[in-house]
Image (spheres, rainbow, N blue to C red):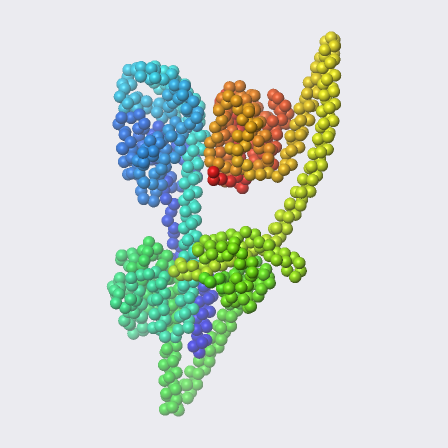
């Protein structure tokens, strides 16, 4: 009967093993909310940044405005630092937009970092744009400064009511960056003009540049916190799994125990292992009152008095006054059989998690304790009946009734045993039907588990290798590379193995596999083995081979077409040269004005034909060779491009990045530089900026020439449009489009061109120089 009883308890435990997190107690313990983000901004850009932040769909952003201090004698850096220290709290992040002097000297309070440009003006427009005015003797201000200029010059030691020669003797003009948010009154400009003695120019800059900077910094902050939360979730999930395994082990153990004291001892031991508390106690409750509390360690003291303990009998749980423990009633079928107390846990901040875990298995503890009591009572009853049978024959009917009752209980246990076997078969079926091979190895790489998919992949049955070292079973595991992967997994790393081709089977067919090695942890977070997940990737490999063969076939066809096209172009160009030569000779000998006009048209047409034929040679080379990973810095330093850069300063900004692009990337950059020199008129500086844009990469090419007119922006990439052959920008777009790179022109007319090239996700990668 004891055997049937233990199996019944095991069935209850196993059937509930997958639902431990959903049984009783606190249903959802909320995670810590994302830390607040505080933006520290100068009062001169308050309106603009407030507008930008209001349009960003991110919560928990707080804006703190500090007084303008760059030119002030009143608000010194130490007062600004004190202001920021008062605003930021532990766990919050501060982003400081302003002068870099504070961060450069290491004066910013903990949790606050400087982001964005070096100055407030740099928030409203690109710094090279601002610097171009400063280098010409301009004083650059923003609308916020203009609106309170009297206060700022007063703090600098000037009288705003009387003009001064300080500005006019050192500067040529004042430039106001108009964002369109703060009204710029004519009287404000006029009064500042009288005071400074300088002309004032207003330049429309909008808030797009500012929006890009603020959005980028906020989204980066958000991404960092999401990544940190994900890591925390993964760590918590692994620990929770380990704790659940410990609980399952406890439930399995107590299902084999029939003595109430032994059940309680194992419960207390498990709680010690799970929570490392200073005190674990269990107070048994019988129908006639409480018994003496069982303690672990035996001489330890309870963290709660009896009044608190007894008050939990009509509650789900109760926390200790100091917040480092709790007590829960152990209940079976609405009957409280005892009270479990845990005090002085190792990590008080996780007290709710510990409580949740405890509540998840208290129902089983109540069942185990009640069952132990019932079986003890049954044993006592059986002993009494056997004793009475020898003394009182007249009790035969009562013994018969008890025997029938026991038979009924036995039948219930038999039914429970059958259901348990069915449950075990169901779980085994799920694991065995997995589409991935699963192998579990212990610390010495002995095989503990080997599912049917592994049997299919390797042709080795689990029954023949159980408990053996994996080095004895599969010879290729002796390879240094695979052995290294196993050792890395045992050291705590998750490792992806390179694709591997298994030896051909008896049917002559080979199989390709991919494997991942993961460590296995015990409840104490010690690594006890390695689990290997093996995937059959044969179909993927065959598809890759088919693609390679198809590409080779296309390449052969392209080569033949290239030869035919080359011969055809050569013949056409020969004939065009004949036409051009004869038309040139006729132009020298014909005097008729109408004939001269016609001959000139012929000469122009023959040159156009020559340019078009030459373009077909370049266009034909598109996609002729596979795209490759190319470093922009190396391509721009090629001899052909450097020869065009005479008299032009080239600047490359950003980290070294490789992009996956057609081998004609050099042609793309050459055409852009050549266009700047040919059509930019006043180009002296070319800038290539490389920066991330979410999961994409943004490569910006810009110069300081005359730019592109608005009505030309949508036409310049069309075939035949332009002042020369009309093919340069069309060819650029086609070359980049082969690897899904887009290009557009978004510069400001009169301020230079700005070509933005967006490289999609997967088409770029960082490199280490």
Residue 586 in view, yes or no: yes
Q: Is residue 261 left or right of residue 718?
A: left
Q: How many marks?
A: 0
Residue 749, above or below 341: above
Tell me residue 712's x, y (percent): 57, 24
Quick one: 403 or 537, which is closer to the camera?
Answer: 537
Figure quadrant of residue 329: bottom left
Residue name at image x 73 percent, y 29 percent: 568
Residue name at image x 40 percent, y 58 percent: 525
Residue 201, above or below 471: above
Q: Is residue 54 left or right of residue 561?
A: left
Residue name at image x 74 percent, y 27 percent: 571
Residue name at image x 54 percent, y 32 percent: 635
- Quadrant where the N terminus sits is bottom left
Tell me residue 529's x, y (percent): 46, 60
Residue 750, above or below 350: above
Q: Is residue 604 left or right of residue 107?
A: right
Tell me residue 75's x, y (percent): 27, 29
Residue 710 in view, yes or no: no
Tell me residue 322's x, y (percent): 27, 57
Figure quadrant of residue 59: top left
């Amino acid at each position: 009967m004891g055997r049937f009883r233990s199996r019944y308890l095991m069935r209850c435990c196993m059937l509930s093993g997958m639902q431990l997190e959903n049984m009783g107690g606190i249903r959802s313990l909320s995670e810590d909310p994302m830390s607040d983000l505080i933006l520290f901004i100068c009062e001169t850009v308050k309106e603009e940044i407030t507008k930008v932040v209001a349009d960003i769909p991110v919560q928990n952003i707080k804006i703190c405005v500090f007084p303008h201090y760059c030119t002030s004698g009143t608000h010194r850096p130490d007062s600004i630092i004190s202001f920021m220290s008062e605003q930021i709290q532990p766990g919050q992040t501060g982003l400081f937009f302003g002068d870099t002097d504070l961060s450069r000297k290491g004066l910013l309070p903990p949790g606050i970092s400087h982001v964005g440009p070096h100055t407030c003006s740099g928030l409203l427009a690109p710094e090279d744009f601002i610097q171009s005015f400063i280098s010409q003797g301009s004083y650059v201000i923003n609308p916020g400064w203009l609106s309170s200029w009297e206060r700022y010059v007063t703090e600098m030691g000037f009288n705003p009511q009387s003009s001064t020669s300080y500005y006019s003797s050192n500067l040529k003009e004042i430039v106001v960056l108009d964002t369109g948010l703060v009204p710029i009154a004519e009287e404000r400009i006029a009064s500042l003009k009288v005071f400074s003695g300088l002309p004032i120019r207003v330049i429309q800059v909008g808030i797009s540049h500012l929006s890009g900077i603020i959005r980028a910094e906020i989204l980066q902050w958000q991404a960092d916190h999401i990544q940190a939360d994900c890591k925390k979730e993964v760590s918590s999930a692994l620990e929770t799994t380990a704790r659940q395994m410990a609980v399952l082990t406890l439930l399995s153990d107590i299902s084999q125990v029939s003595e109430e004291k032994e059940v309680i001892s194992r419960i207390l031991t498990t709680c010690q292992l799970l929570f490392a508390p200073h005190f674990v106690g269990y107070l048994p409750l019988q129908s006639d009152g409480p018994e003496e509390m069982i303690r672990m360690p035996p001489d330890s003291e309870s963290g709660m008095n009896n009044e608190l303990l007894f008050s939990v009998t009509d509650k789900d749980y109760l926390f200790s006054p100091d917040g480092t423990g709790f007590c829960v009633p152990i209940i079976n079928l609405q009957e409280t059989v005892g009270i479990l107390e845990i005090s002085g846990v190792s990590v008080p901040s996780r007290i709710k998690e510990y409580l949740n875990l405890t509540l998840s298995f208290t129902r089983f503890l109540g069942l185990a304790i009640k069952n132990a009591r019932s079986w003890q009572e049954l044993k006592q009853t059986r002993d009494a009946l056997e004793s009475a049978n020898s003394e009182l024959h007249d009790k035969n009917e009562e013994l018969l009734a008890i025997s029938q009752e026991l038979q009924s209980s036995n039948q219930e246990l038999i039914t429970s045993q059958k259901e348990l076997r069915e449950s075990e078969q169901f779980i085994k079926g799920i694991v065995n039907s997995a589409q991935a091979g699963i192998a579990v190895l212990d610390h010495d790489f002995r095989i503990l588990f080997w599912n049917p998919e592994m049997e299919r992949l390797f042709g080795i049955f689990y029954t023949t290798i159980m408990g053996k070292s994996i080095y004895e079973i599969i010879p290729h595991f002796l390879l240094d590379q695979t052995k290294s992967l196993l050792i890395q997994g045992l050291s705590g790393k998750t490792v992806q193995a390179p694709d591997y081709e298994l030896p051909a089977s008896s049917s002559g067919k080979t199989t390709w596999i991919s494997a991942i090695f993961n460590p296995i942890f015990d409840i104490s977070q010690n690594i006890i083995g390695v689990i290997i997940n093996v995937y059959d990737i044969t179909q993927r490999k065959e598809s890759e081979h088919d693609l390679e063969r198809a590409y080779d076939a296309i390449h052969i066809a392209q080569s033949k077409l290239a030869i035919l096209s080359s011969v055809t172009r050569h013949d056409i160009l020969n004939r065009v040269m004949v036409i051009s030569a004869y038309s040139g000779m006729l132009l020298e000998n014909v005097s008729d004005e109408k004939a001269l006009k016609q001959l000139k048209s012929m000469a122009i047409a023959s040159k156009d034909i020559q340019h078009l034929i030459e373009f077909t040679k370049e266009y034909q080379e598109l996609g002729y060779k596979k795209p490759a990973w190319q470093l922009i810095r190396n391509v721009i330093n090629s001899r052909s491009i450097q020869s065009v850069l005479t008299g032009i300063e080239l600047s490359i900004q950003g980290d070294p990045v490789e992009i996956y692009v057609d081998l004609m990337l050099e042609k793309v950059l050459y055409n852009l530089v050549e266009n700047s020199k040919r059509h930019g008129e006043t180009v002296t500086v070319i800038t290539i900026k490389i920066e991330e844009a979410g999961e994409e990469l943004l490569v910006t090419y810009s110069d300081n020439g005359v730019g592109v007119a608005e009505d030309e922006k949508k036409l310049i990439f069309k075939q035949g449009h332009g002042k020369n052959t009309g093919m340069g920008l069309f060819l650029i777009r086609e070359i980049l489009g082969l690897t899904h790179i887009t290009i557009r022109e978004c510069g400001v007319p009169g301020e230079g061109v700005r070509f933005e090239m967006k490289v999609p996700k997967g088409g770029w990668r960082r490199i280490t120089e």
